[in-house]
Amino acid sequence: MVVREKILDMVVSCFKRHGAKGLDTPAFELKEMLTEKYGEDSMLIYDLKDQGGELLSLRYDLTEVPFARYLAMNKVKKMKRYHVGKVWRRESPTIVQGRYREFCQCDFDIAGQFDPMIPDAECLKIMCEILSGLQLGDFLIKVNDRRILDGIFAVCGIPESKFHAICSSIDKLDKMSWKDVRHEMVAKKGLAPEVADRIGDYVQCHGGVSLVEQMFQDSELSQNQHALEGLRDLKLLFEYLTLFGVAEKISFDLSLARGLDYYTGVIYEAVLLQTSARAGEEPLNVGSVAAGGRYDGLVGMFDPKGHKVPCVGLSIGVERIFSIVEQRMKNVGEKIRTTETEVFVATPQKNFLQERLKLIAELWDAGIKAELMYKNNPKLLTQLRYCENMGIPLMVIIGEQELKEGVIKLRSVASREEVAIKRENLVAEIQKRLSES
C-alpha cells in the first residue's frame, strides 16, 4: 500500500496540475450497456446475479462506458477529468505481468470541441511527465492514427470487412515477428500473400516527424482522404510536442493498432525500453505501461439523439508499474516504512500507563503521529526495539524522575541521544525537529 499510495499520489498530482477534476462512478453498470460496447471482450465481464431488479455487471474499465455514459446522461459538453478506481475482468491472472482480475485503473480524459491536436499533445505530455517522474527507466511512446491505418488497408486492397481482423494481427507485432504475423494474416485470415507483403512494407516503418513527411510523399497513400487527414493531424501533433519539449520521446509507429474498437484518430502506447536499469537485476518484461487515444464517437452512442462529444484520453497502467517498482525494491533490498509514526511514547517503569495516555493524547491533539505500546508495564528494551524496527524517529520517555522535575526525555532513535525538555515545550520541540528532518 505504501508503494501504491506513493505512485498514485504522483499520478493524481500530475492530473491536477493539468487542471483535471476528479470523478467517480458506480462499480457496476447496466449489463446491456457493457455487453454492447466491448465486442468479443464481453465474455471477460463479471455479471451480478439477477435478484429481481435490473441486470447489472461490474465495470470493465473507467472510460469506454462509465465516462462516456456520464457525459451523455448529464449532457456535459466539456470536461477535463481524472478517475482512479477498481475495475474487474474475468481473465487468467498472471501476477508477473501485472495482470489481475481486480485491478486499479488511472485515467485522464479531455472531452469537448477544441482546435485540433492541442488536447492530444497535452495527453502525451502528461504521459511523459508521469513516466519521467516515476523513474522507471527509459521509455518510448509509440503514436499512430486510426485514419492512417484505414488508409493503408484501403490502398493495399484489404476489403473493409477484414479491417478489424487484420488490425488485431498487426497489434501483435510487438510480441511476434513480422514473419509470424504475415503467416497468421495469410493462413488464418485468408489474405492474399502479395497484399500481406504490401502491408508489411508500411507497418514495419517507424520514426519521427520525417516519417510523417515521407508518408505525405507516398503517391497512393496521399490520395486517400482518411490517411491524409491523419497525417495532417500528426504533423501538427509533432509541432506541439516539440514545443512541449517531449518530441524525442515519441515515435510514429505504423504497427501500432491498439484494439481499435472505438478509437477514431490518434492512438498511443508507452513502453519501457529497459526496465532493468541497474546491474545485476532480473530484466522485467511488462509490456505497455500507459496508453490511450482519441475516441470521438463514443459519447454519441449513449445519447438518445446521438449528439457527439469529441474526447481524447490516456490510461496509466498502474498495476504494471506497481509490480516493476516492487520488484526493483526487492532486488536492491530496500526497506520501506509501512507506517508514518513520528513519535513513540515510552516508559522505563511500571504503573505509568495513565501518564503515557495523557501524554499521547496531547501529541495526537497537536496533529503529531504517535503510538504507544498497549501494555500496562512494557519493558523499555521492547519499546526501543519496536521503534528501531518500525523506523520511528523520535521517542518520548516519562518516568518517576521526569514526572518529579516536570520534564520529558526526548530521544533520537537513530543517534540514541537524549535531552530533557520541559513538559509545556515538548510539542513545540517535536514539531521543530520534525520540520527540520
Image (cartoon, grey):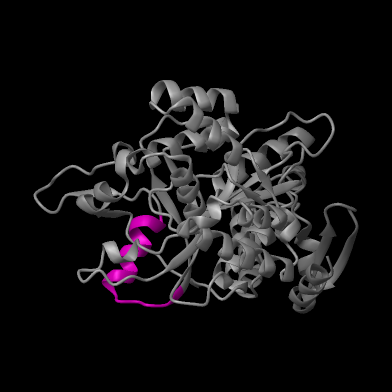
Q: Is 3 drawn above or below residue 276 in the view shown?
A: below
Residue at 46% in and 43% down: 153
Q: Is 201 drawn above or below residue 417 in the view shown?
A: above
Residue 181 in the image: state x and y as whole percent.
52, 27
Residue at 29% in and 41% down: 46
Front in this rendered view, residue 344 or 181: 181
Residue 151 in the image: state x and y as whole percent.
47, 50
Front in this rendered view, residue 122 or 187: 187
In this view, the residue farthest toward the front is 219
**Residue 73 highlighted magenta (yes or no):** yes
Work out whether residue 337 can be spotted. Answer: no
Front in this rendered view, residue 349 or 87: 87
Residue 156 in the image: state x and y as whole percent.
48, 40
Query: Going by the image, does 22 lie left or right of 395?
Result: left
Query: Going by the image, does 227 lie left or right of 411?
Result: left
**In this picture, which residue range is highlighted in magenta?**
62-79
Front in this rendered view, residue 255 or 123: 255
Work out whether residue 212 can be spotted. Answer: yes
